[in-house]
Amino acid sequence: MLDADASRPIRVLVVDDHAVVRRGLSAFFDVLPDIEVVGEAADGHDAIQALGDLAARDALPDVVLMDLVMPRLDGLDATRAVKERYPSVEVVALTSFSEAERVHLALAAGAAGYLLKDAEADEVGAAVRAAHRGEVHLDSAVARQLMRTLTAPHRAATELTPREREILKLVAQGKSNRDIARTLVISERTARTHASNVLTKLGLASRTQAALWAIREGLVAHP
């Protein structure tokens, strides 16, 4: 039997302190049949309140587009709060090219990926869909800058088992645990366990950091 949620649009909460950005993103999503905006917020404080209201109606969004620089409660602290209170909700950080250092912190806080504010409309949709699938989304321009400042240790890939190296490469390609399981013909639970072991061994906080690490170490092609 089909999952009832499989046919519904991806629910998105847009968080940005600039009304024009919020309106622009909402207008773009309005023309996409598979994505719908369920709310907007002007800062992190309002975002947490909006999520609480949506949770009370059993209507939590699937993805939050989160600006990193906002008054009152910025995107970093808001991302951390979202992932602590609503772990099923994915966060995609909205950033300018000059904010690469903040992106590191956002990834450590639990963001699933990051998107430049001047990204093309198609990439915005792709980022939301990737996050909803549990995949990593890397903006190529920011990824190149982040790799130069990646603080993860230069641990040898030989510390990983052959299977963990396979898992890492697939994670770096943006594959979800379900995709990895299908590719390697293993259970999704086993894929999740391997991915967790990879992060632990490499001292990394997120799948996105693992992807950057794999790119930096030459295990996968540069985005």
Image: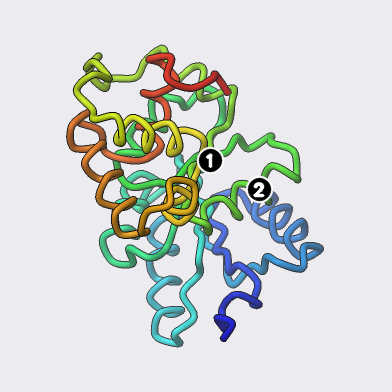
Secondary structure at numbered mark 2? helix
- Measuring from the top left, give residue 92's x and y in whole percent: 50, 48
Contact check, label 1 and label 2, Cβ < 8 Å: yes
Q: Which mark is residue 137?
A: 1
Q: Residues within 10 Å of mark 1 (few under 14, many from 20)?
A: many
Is 134 situated left or right of 81 in this image? right
Compared to residue 16, the image places residue 171 above or below, namely above
Q: Position of residue 89 (x, y in %)?
A: 42, 63
Quarter of the image with the C terminus in it: top right
Q: Which of marks 1 and 2 is nearer the N terminus?
A: 2
Question: Looking at numbered disc 1 in the image, what kind of residue is underneath it?
Answer: His
Which residue is located at x 51 percent, y 35 percent?
173
> CA–CA distance between discs 1 and 2?
8 Å
Image quadrant containing the N terminus: bottom right
Judging depth in this view, the residue of 161 and 2 nearest the camera is 161
What amino acid is at disc 2?
Ala
Task: Kindly identify the residue that appears in the image at 25 percent across and 45 percent down.
Answer: 196
Check disc 2: other Cα within 10 Å, few if <14, some if 14-19, many if 20+.
few
160 with respect to 184 (left or right): left
Count of picture labels: 2
Please state the horizontal and vertical placement of residue 100, each as a whole percent of the image: 45, 25
Q: Residue farthest to the front? A: 185
> Is residue 175 depicted above or below 2 in this figure?
above
Q: Which mark is residue 71?
A: none
Q: Is mark 1 on a helix, strand or loop?
A: loop
**Residue nearer the viewer, 195 or 150:** 195
Taking the image as shown, residue 190 lies to the left or right of residue 222, namely left
Q: Which residue is drawn at 42% across and 71% down?
A: 51
Q: Pinpoint residue 5: horizontal percent, then vertical percent.
A: 56, 78
What residue is shown with label 2? Answer: 126
Q: Residue at x 37, y 40 (%)?
A: 207
- Give above or below for 76 relative to 78: above
